[in-house]
Amino acid sequence: MKKYIDYIRIGMKEHLVYPSAVCAKLFSKIIYLYLQFCIWSALFSSGSIKNLAINKTDTLRYIVVATIVSTVIECNIIEKINAQIQSGNIATELIRPIGFKRMLFSRHLGDTAIKIICCLLPLIGLVKASVSLQLLCIEQIGFGIISILLAYGIQFLYSIIIGLLAFWLIVTWPINMFLSAIYKLLSGVWIPVTMFPEILYRINLFLPFRAIYSIPVSVLTNSMKMNVIWQSIGVQIIWLVILYILMQFLWHEGRNKLVVQGG
Amino acid sequence: MNSDNIIIEAAELRKTFKVKNREGNLFAVKRYSQIEAVKDVSFSISKGDIVGFIGSNGAGKSTTIKMLTGILMPDSGSILINGMDYKKRRREIMMKIGVVFGQRSVLCWDIPVIESFRLFKDMYCIPNEIYNENMDMFTDILNLKEYIYKPPRLLSLGQRMKADLAAALLYNPEILFLDEPTIGIDVLAKDRIRDFIKRINQERCTSVVLTTHDVSDIEALCHKMLVIDRGSLLYDGTLNDMKEMFAVQYGDGRDKEEIELEHIIKQIYKGRFL
């Protein structure tokens, strides 16, 4: 157990090695949030959006909360696994008496801890000070946190699965680019999924993406009936299990496929 | 040789890679070809041996080492480390082997070396006394003090290599695998690294398997030799016997001491000997 705590510490330290990168991250989030806020406000005031299931206030709440939550949920291990498989440096991890995936998760936890301190908290402070909207649905905040934790797990598994595809493809950035476009649209990190046309909405019901942003953010911002909340969390748990099984399968198949490149 | 002493046993190892060939222009038809990187390689290594594993570039050394260290799975054949199989007792084996890759570092790139050492201390459950004793010894021989508080990205290649070597030996492994440990290292640093490996081997009876292209490494360290070419094992025996064999066949009356090892190895790679 202790070794995984060490990895959490290492993840934190690795994140802090380049302080300018941490600051840049925070600023990019602030600018992004401001941009989103301006675009949606302008869209609604211009009157070009009509007959939507969601009004201006709800949209703004959704967008602000989604952006804040994204600082925690984001996961950059796709590139890390990719780089390791591509360069063959994964060899140096495979010779250790540890679980590779657990090691990745521990590092990711450390990474997230720093993001919470350096990105999430300042962002929350800033939003509190500058936006006068009531953002959260206070009664559901407990469920919201559970939902965020599940989404965190789903995002991690999703990333590791895409990363592990490198065992077969060696280079996964093209597929990653393609998927990240779909991901950004369908997960609801850019646009509330309730705005989708019927057909897209229906397709999305069968994909894991909405479990990452749409569900937790909705639970946090919309007042819902109890059974709807449980249903949402149930959907997340199902996806967590499915992706976990898929990841284990890919890992076992991929290990036999591994070609350590370069000497 | 006592069979109880055998620490590594490899039997009929085989590994094939599928390689994509695309000849001519970008739109040429892709053809796949099978490359047999290692075919039917069997050998055993006893406790306390220092074994030099040589072969020309692309002969299959690295592939074999990677199979021995559990990084690659052989297509067929078996590897027993201390009687244990990677499929069933992977973690136990990992606790007993140390690996150093000359061309890659196992240390976390951006954080001080000492942090990586602390991680290994917990990872391998190293008791405090052993950790401190080892750290003292490594500081002594490898000058750890000079660079242990710096991250690997700021170290010279020689320092990084020494730090990697120390990291691999921190938990007193029974077998040490060295994949080109002296590549790109200056003469003095090389000497230190060799002395260190020798001392560890003598004091702790650690078995060492090393691949190298540096003939002086072999002469300084190895008792035993494994020679591999195009995926097949050509020679498995002592360095001395190999020299003697060469002297008898091609020596023209010269004694084995007078023939340079480099000459022998060149003849092997050219396909004229063994």
Image: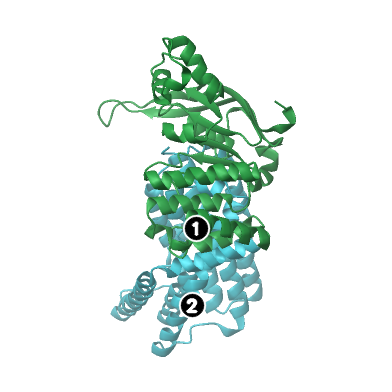
Q: Earlier in the sequence, mark 2 or mark 1?
A: 2
| Vertical placement of residue B15 versus A193, above or below | above
Q: Chain of mark 1?
A: A
Residue beneath label 2, please? A117
Image location of residue B209, percent across then percent down: 55, 36
Residue beneath label 1, please? A204
| Left or right position of B97 against A259 | right
SS class, disc 1: helix
The circle drawn on residue B60 is: none
Q: Answer few, some or many: residues within 10 Å of disc 2's Cα (few below 14, many 20 plus, some between 14 and 19).
A: few
Image location of residue B110, percent across then percent down: 43, 61
| Vertical placement of residue A166 versus B47, above or below | below
Q: Answer few, some or many: residues within 10 Å of disc 1's Cα (few below 14, many 20 plus, some between 14 and 19).
A: some
Mark 1: amino acid: Asn
- Please name whichever residue, B265 or B188, is drawn nearer the observer in this view of the structure: B188
Mark 2: amino acid: Ile
Q: What is the letter of the green chain? A: B
SS class, disc 2: helix
- Please name whichever residue, B120 or A128, is drawn nearer the observer in this view of the structure: B120
Image location of residue B158, percent across then percent down: 40, 50
Q: Chain of mark 2?
A: A
Residue at 49 percent of width and 72 percent of height = A114
Residue at 30 percent of width and 74 percent of height = A48
Displayed quadrant of residue B187: top left
Residue at 43 percent of width and 34 percent of height = B216
| Vertical placement of residue A98 versus A112, above or below | above
Looking at the figure, which quarter contains the N terminus of chain B? top right
Q: Please tell me the colour of chain A.
A: cyan
For the residues beneath circles 2 and 1, the answer to whether they share a chain is yes
